[in-house]
Image (spheres, helix red, strand yellow):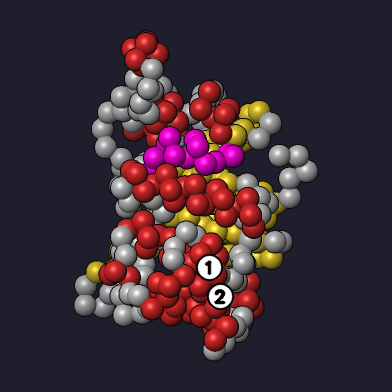
Amino acid sequence: MDNKETLLNVENLVMYFPIKRGVFQRTVGHVHAVDDISFRVYKGETLGLVGESGCGKSTTGRAILQLYRPTAGHVFFEDRDLTTMKGEDLRSTRKRMQMIFQDPYASLNPRMTVEEIVGEPLIVHNMAKGREVREMVKELLGLVGLNPAYVDRYPHEFSGGQRQRIGVARSLSLSPSLIVCDEPISALDVSIQAQVINLLEDMQEKFNLTYLFIAHDLSVVRHISDRVAVMYLGALVELASRDELYAKPLHPYTQALLSAVPIPDPMVEEKRRRVILTGDVPSPINPPSGCRFRTRCPLAVDICAEKKPEWREVAPEHFVACHLV
């Protein structure tokens, strides 16, 4: 991607959730969900964000869209700082950013028809009213591969894959430039996953969309992403182009993750070295000092416990946070 134009610039993003106890709900600690992460998303690309469950991927997506107000840091969207925006200013900018949620069963209101679900953003942002809404919803349903005659149906009348298509239609209704896809296929059957991925790719090509694609399925991320960021316990450990990350992972955690992806060729699979991580992921309430990964890292040395590794560019567009790289 030459002449890359930055659409989203995340700087030192921090998201802590207070833990409250007792009658007076005193704050006794914090969950360090996202801790000081920085990255850019370029116009028209798909940035994959991967990591194991509970590492802060979804929280990152929500904090970027200001569904959670970040504890610290800045999120620049089209050069405007979303963290300082409020009220109408933020609402008008929100039109340009949308989200596809993880669970198509929970993200659609069961009491609303498809017309009401997909048409709601159009009405809220004064993009259409009356008969126009119905026509636009029909057009959007056709666009995502659903029968436009389904406008009066309720979510329970659809399968999981069809519901996720309704979610995609809703996210496209305001012609956004950025869509945060929060594990949009993890709740679906494998046969349906490919259809939704293909739909997302078609929509990207047609409308020049930019995706932040959050997932934990590394083979899916490899298929859809231009660049991939790897997250562990609220911190980014590596970010590189897809081909470079999969061919030459530098961080021990990335190497361990990629060694778990099955390869269809039995000859190659047999010769491959698996990296088995010992121990459990530490608690985000009390993360380890220095490098977050050091408690499970097979290469950890003394400096890993003392000093937080610096997030630095070790090759063009290849960032890593590790003392040993």
Q: Could you say which is closer to the camera, residue 189 or residue 47?
A: 189
x, y (%) of residue 55? Answer: 38, 47
* Crowdedness near tag 2: few (<14), some (14–19) or many (≥20) residues, C-alpha within 10 Å: some
Residue 122: quarter of image: bottom right
Number of numbered discs overlaid on the protein picture: 2
Residue positioned 57% across, 83% down in the render: 132
Residue positioned 58% across, 77% down in the render: 91
* Crowdedness near tag 1: few (<14), some (14–19) or many (≥20) residues, C-alpha within 10 Å: many
Which numbered tag is attached to residue 92?
none
Q: Could you say which is closer to the camera, residue 255 or residue 42?
A: 42
Look at the image and give the residue range highlighted in magenta.
212-227
Element on which disc 2 rests: helix
- Residue where numbered disc 2 is placed: 136
Are the two marked residues, 1 and 2, in contact with CB atoms closer than 8 angstroms?
yes
Q: Could you say which is closer to the camera, residue 299 or residue 164?
A: 164
x, y (%) of residue 179? Answer: 55, 59
Q: Is residue 238 magenta?
A: no
Q: Residue furthest right?
A: 3
Task: Answer with left or right where residue 172 lies relative to residue 234.
Answer: right
x, y (%) of residue 259? Answer: 38, 24
Residue positioned 36% across, 70% down in the render: 108
Q: Amino acid at mark 2?
A: Met
- Residue where numbered disc 1 is placed: 140
Identify the image quadrant of the N terminus: top right
Q: Amino acid at mark 1?
A: Leu
x, y (%) of residue 252? Answer: 44, 27
Identify the image quadrant of the C terminus: top right
Q: Could you say which is closer to the camera, residue 293 or residue 146?
A: 146
Spatial CA span between label 1 and label 2: 6 Å
Residue 266: quarter of image: top left
Task: Answer with left or right where residue 112 lies relative to residue 245.
Answer: left
